[in-house]
Image (tube, coloured by chain):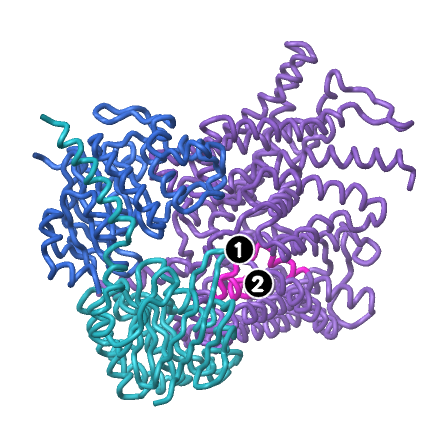
Chain colours: A purple, B cyan, C blue
Amino acid sequence: MTDPAFLLIQFLNGLASASNLFLIACGLSIIFGVTRIVNFAHGSFYMLGAYFAFTLADHMMPALGDAVGFWLAIPLAAVGVGLFAVLVELVLLRRIYRSHELFQLLATFGVVLIVQDLVPAVWGPEELFGPRAPGFTSFVTILGFRFPEYQLVLIAAGPLVLGALWLLFNRTRWGTLVRAATQDREMVGALGVNQAILFTGVLFLGGLLAGLAGALQLPVEPANPFMDIHVIAEAFVVTVVGGMGSVLGAFLAALIIAELQAFGILVFPEVTLVLPFLVMALVLVWRPWGLLGRPEAATGHGFAGDRPLRPLGTPGQLAAAALIVVLLLLPLVLGDYAEKLALEVFVFALFAFSLNFIMGAGGMVSFGHAAYFGLGAYGAALAVKQLGLAMLPALVAAPLLAGLGALAFGWFVVRLSGVYLAMLTLAFAQIAWSTAFQWVELTGGDNGMIGIWPSAWASNVTVYYYLTLLLCGAATAFLWRASFAPFGYTLRAGRDSPLRCDAIGIDVKRHQWLGFALAGTCAGIAGGVFVFSKGNVDPGALSIPTSVDGLVMVLLGGIQTLTGPLLGAAAFHLLEAYVLPLTDYWRALVGLVILLLVVAFPQGLAGFLRDLIERRGASA
Amino acid sequence: MTAVLEVEGLHKTFGGLVAVEAASFSVEAGRLFAIIGPNGAGKSTCFNMVGGQLRPDRGAVRLAGRDITGEPPRRIWRLGVGRTFQVAAAFGSMTVAENVQMAFLSHRRRIRALLPPARRLYREEALAVLDRVGMAGQADRQCGQLAYGDIKRVELAVALAHRPKLLLMDEPTAGMAPRERVELMALTAGIVRESGISVLFTEHDMDVVFAHADRLLVLDRGRMVAEGTPAEVRDNPEVQRIYLGGAGAEAALRQIEARQGTRGEARP
Amino acid sequence: MSALLSVSGLEAFYGRAHILFEVALEVGRGEVVALLGRNGAGKSTTLKAIVGLLADTRGERRFDGRDIARLAPYRIAQAGLGYVPEERRIFTDLTVMENLEVGRQPPREGAPAWTPEKLFALFPNLAEMRDRPGGRMSGGEQQMLTIARTLMGNPRAILLDEPSEGLAPVIVEQMAVTIAALKDEGMTVLLSEQNLYFARALADRAYVIEGGRIRYQGTMAELMADEAVRQAYLTV
C-alpha cells in the first residue's frame, strides 16, 4: 500500500477523474458566472453527451472507419449537447433570469426530470457500453503497473481544455466580454453589448463542455440513465469549492477533490462519497466564496407578493374544525390502502410545512431538507434495529437525531445566503445520503433496513392513522402557531431586513440557526412516522429527489401562504399515487409541472386561490 | 449641559486610504447635530463608527459617559441608540404596527417565544409610538405598500420604540419628495424638543440642515473642516470653497482659458 | 437647432422612493451641458434613467431623432449615446486593453472613430499600463479608463457622471483639460457635477437640480453671476 509505484498509479487515476470533474464543473461555473443561474441540468447535459456519443459512434464508426468515426463522434456529440443547452436557454432560462433563485434552481431541476424520462424512452433503460477508443485500447507499463492508455487521454483532456478556455477567454473578444459580464453584466450592457446573445453563447459553451465530458467518459463507463444525478452533486461541489464563476478555481478544486478521493479510498474507503461534501462544507466556512471566487453582493430578498400574516378568521377556523372532523371520521369510509395514503399525506404535509417554515418565513432556500426527514427515518429505524427499542421510544429518537443533525449542519448553513446557502444544504443532504449509502454495517447501505413495523397495539392501519394524525397534526399545529408567535415573526424580520434587525438588537444568524434546527426536528418527526408506515427505510429518503419533492409541494401549494404547503403536499402525494401508475413518464410530468409553476404560476395553488378570492372581493 | 455622545479622535483607514482623520465632537442632550460634506468626505464612515457597523482604528466613542467604542450595533442599540438608514430599512411583509412591535419584542427579549400570538404583544405601546409620528391611522397597512415618506416615518417610530437617548439618522430625507422632507424633519425636531433625546444626522439637503441642526460638523476627505453653529459654518470661507470645487478645477480653468486665448490670438 | 438629446417629463423611482420629478433637459450637438447639484440631488439618477439603467422610469427620452424611452441599455449605447458611470465600474480583472475592448463598437458616421492608440494620446497615463488589471489602478487612472472605455463605442454624445469626484486636484485638472479637448473635437457632453468650478471650465450651459427637480437653467455665465441660485442649490 505504501509502494511508491502504486501511489503514483493512484495519483494518475486521481488526475483522470479530476479531468472529468473539471470538464463538467467549469461549464457549470461559466454559466453561473454570467447568468447567475445554478444549472441543475448540467448533469443532464453530461449524460446526453455520453448518449449522443454512443449513437454517433454507432453510426459513424462503420461508415467512416473506427478511428475517424470515433474521434469525430466525440466532438460532434459535444456540439449536439451545446445546441441542446441553447434550446434550454431560449425556451426556459430566458424567462427566469429575474426570478428568485429558488425558481431558477427548481426550473433547471425540471429539465433534469424531463431528460431523465426522455433518455430511457429514446435509448432504452439498459446501460449502453460504448466502443473502446481507437488508438488507445491498450495499456502502458508504469513502474511495473499496467495503466490504461485511455486514462492518459483523459488526464491530458483537463489541462488541454483549461488551456483552450484560457485562450478563448484571454485572446478573443467574445471571451473578454464573458469575463467582463461575469463581473458586471449591467455595465457590459451599458457599453452596447447585447446580453441575450452573450447568454446564449455561454450556454452553448457550457453545454459543449459537459457534453464533451460525457462523450469522453463513454469508453470508460457505460451510458446509463443515472449518470446525471450522480455527477451533478460532485460538479456542484467542485464549482462551489473553486469559487462560482472561476474556471481556474474549478480546475484546482477538481484536482484537490479527485486526489483526495483517490487516496482517501486507500485509507478509509467508507468516506469516499462523503469526502467531497466535507471538503465543500469546510471550504465554505473558511472561504464563503470558494478558493478563487469573489464575494457576491447580497441577493437576499423575499418572494414577490409577501403579505402580512393573518390568523385564520372565523370562516377559516370553521373550515379547519370541519377538516379535523373529516380527518377523524375518514377511517370509517376509507379502505386500508386509502387510509395509508391519507396518513402519508399527513407525513408529507408536515415535511413540506417544516420546509416552508425556513424557506417562506426564514428566506433560506433549502435543497437538502430531505436530510432531516431521512435522519428522522433512520433515527427511528436504527433505534429499532440497533438498539432494540419499541416504536414509541424510536419515535422520540427520530426528531432527536434529525434535530441534532439540523443543529450541526445549520450552524454552517446560516453563515451563507442565497444560492450558496441552497448548495450547502444540498451538500449536507448528500453527506447524510452518502453516509447511509456507504455505512453498510450500520444502515444496510443501498438496501436500507426492513421490517420496522409499529408495536402490536398500533399495527392496525386505523390505529396508526390516528397516531400519525396526532403526531404530524400536533407538530404542524405547533409550527403554525410558532409562525404567528414572536419566533416566526423574528424569522420573517430577518428575511425582510437583516440591517433593521441588527439595529433593533436581533441576532439574525442565531435566530435562523434555531429556526433551521426547529424545522429539521419537525421534519424528523415526519420521517420517523413514515418509517413505521412503510416498514422500511433506504437512502432514497435522504436523496435529492426527496428534497425536490418537498420543494415542489411547497411551490405547488404556494410559498407565501401557510396553507399552501399543506395543500401542495396533499395534491402532490395524491397525484403521485393515482397518476404515477398510469404513466411511464411520471418524472417528465413532474418536470413539466415544475416548469409550468415557475413560469406561469409562481404564486402556487393557495396564492392563486387567494388572488382569485381577493379579486372577486374587490369587484363585489 | 451634559453630552449624550462624545466622539474623540476617531480615525479610520481603508487599505491605506484615510477615510476619517481625528474626528472629535460631542452632542448635547436635546440637540440635533448634523455632519455634512461632499461625497467621499467620510460622513458615512464616521456615522457607522458611532453606530457600531465599523470599528475605528483609533479614538473613542462615549454614550452618556460610557465607552462604547467598537461595540456591535446590537449592543449599542440596547444601550439606548436608535437608528434610521439612508434607504429605509423596514420589514416590508409586516404591518406598520408589527414593525414597531418587533422593536418591543426584541427590547423585552421575547423574540424566541414560540406560542403567544405576536400581533397582540405590545400593540398598545406600538400604537402610542406610531401616534407620535402620525402613523397610528395606518397601523394595519402593510409596510411595503406605503409611500416612501411614510416608510421613513415607520422607521423613525421603530427607532424611537425603546426610548433611546440618541437617534442616529443617516440622510433621513434621502429619496423623499420635498414636502415630505420638511414634514419629517419638523416631526423629528418636535420629538427631540418634547422628549429631550439627541439626534446625530448626516444630510445633503442644506435647507433641512440649516432649518433644524443646532450644530454642524463639516468633513472633507476625512478631515474636520469646521464645527459650529449653522451661522458660523455658513460664514466659513473654507467651507464655501469645498462645496464649490477644489484648486484643481481652478487651475484647469486657467489652463483651458490660456489655450483658448492663444488660439484666439492666432486667428486673424 | 434641434437638440441631439432631449428629455422631458422624466420620472424615476427606486423601489417605492420617487427620485425624479418631471425632469426636462436638452443638449444640442457639440454642446457641453452641466447638470449641477449637491449630493443626492438626483444627478446620477437622471443620467441612469436616460440610458435605461433604472427599472422604473417614465417620461420622454429622444436621442438623435429617435425615441429611446423603450430601448434596452445596449440598444441606447448602440444608438451612439455613451454613459460613464460615477462609480467607474471598471472590470477589475480585465487589463486596460481588455476594458477598452469591451467598449468597442463599430465606427459610426458623424462621430470620431476611436482606437486605443488615439485614446492613449488623449490619456497618456493609460498608455503606460496597457496590460495592467483595472483593479490595480489608482482612482484617477480608473476614471480616465472608464471614459476611454465609453469612447471606444464611438459615441455621438456622452453622459459623464461626476468625473471629478474624489480625485486629487492635479487629476481634476487633467480631467478637465481632457474633457475640454473632447469638446474641441465636437463631442456632445452632458456632465453631472457638484464641482461648480469644474463645470465652469467646461460647460456652455447648466441645469441645476435639487430634490429631483430642475430648479434652474441658463448659460454657465448667467449661473456664475447668479449668487442666489448658487447659495440655494449648490453651496451650504
The numbered dot on residue C117 is none
Q: Is residue A25 above or below residue A510?
A: above
* Rendered location of residue A518, percent (x, y): 59, 70
Which residue is painted at 39% across and 78% down in the image?
B82
Q: Nearer the viewer, residue A449 or A500?
A: A500
* Rendered location of residue A227, percent (x, y): 66, 37
Q: Nearer the viewer, residue A67 or A413?
A: A413
Taking the image as shown, residue B155 lies to the left or right of residue B18, namely left
Callout 1–callout 2 Cβ contact below 8 Å: no
Q: Can you say which quadrant of the picture contains the N terminus of chain B? A: bottom left
CA separation in Å, label 1 and label 2: 19 Å
Q: Is residue A401 above or below residue C160?
A: below
Residue that numbered label 1 is attached to: A551
* Rendered location of residue A141, percent (x, y): 87, 24
Region rendered in magenta: A351-374
Q: Can you say which quadrant of the picture contains the C terminus of chain B? A: top left
Residue C40 in sight: no
Which residue type carries mark 2?
Val
Residue that numbered label 2 is attached to: A414
Chain ID at mark 2: A
